[in-house]
Image: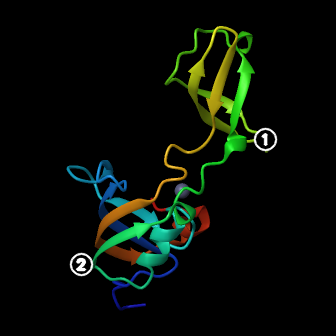
Amino acid sequence: MNETTTTIANDTVVSIEYTLKDDAGEVLDSSDGGEPLSYLHGHGQIIPGLERELDGKSVGDELSLHIEAEDAYGPHDPERIVEVERSNFEFDVKEGDYVQAQHPDGSVIPFLVTEAGETTVTLDGNHPLAGKALNFDVKVVAVRDATEEERSHGHAH
Ligand SMILES: [Zn+2]
């Protein structure tokens, strides 16, 4: 293990600069002006389509990717939209608020309040980017082997 790792493979820590746009060209997220994003490759820490495209790439590589919703945050699931009684809330919920609520599978996730009526409130537990195709401009800026601790934790430090 004397050679320096520069190629992306499972259990490498990858740093990327990226700009994320929706299909209308609007910038949704970007590492511009901040730190590059670092993640542990092969552990599902980034969306599947991006992880798959980065596999085998090297420092300095630049990619322009179009990733369908299925390989990003998944389809928009209508079953994640629920209507609840306003009396469940101890505060005045408004449209656009996020509230923590328990999903039927037991996990506690943020729900977006999409409608706040007088007696009922509509909550959407989908990821904000669910159902959206994503366009990434990505540049690989660093690759290194993960430490043993990072491997056992399943994320980059
Ligand atoms: Zn850790």
What is the spatial separation of the Cα atoms under label 1 and label 2, in whole angstroms?
42 Å
SS at circle 2: loop
Q: Position of residue 23 (x, y in %)?
A: 36, 56
Above or below, 60 relative to 132: below
Residue 150 percent across, percent down from the top left: 52, 65
Kindly identify the residue that appears in the image at 66 percent across and 19 percent down.
121
Residue at image point 52% right, 79% down:
10
Q: For mark 2, does the 10 Å Cα neighbourhood hold few (<14), some (14 to 19), or many (20 or more) residues?
A: some
Name above or below for residue 67 compared with residue 73.
Answer: below
Say left or right for 23 vs 92: left
Q: Quadrant of the C terminus?
A: bottom left
The circle drawn on residue 106 is 1
Left or right placement of residue 91 versus residue 25 in this view: right
First-in-chain label (1 vs 2): 2
For disc 2, the marked residue is: 60
Quadrant in the picture for the N terminus? bottom left
**Is 116 in front, or is 62?**
116
Which numbered circle lies on residue 33? none
**Looking at the image, in which quadrant does ligand 1 appear?**
bottom right
**Where residue 58 sits in the image (x, y, percent)?**
32, 83
Kind of residue at disc 2:
Gly
In this view, 61 is above or below 43:
below
Kindly state the secondary structure of the residue where label 1 is placed: loop
Question: Relative to 53, does residue 149 appear above or below in the rendering?
Answer: above
Scheme of colours in the image:
rainbow
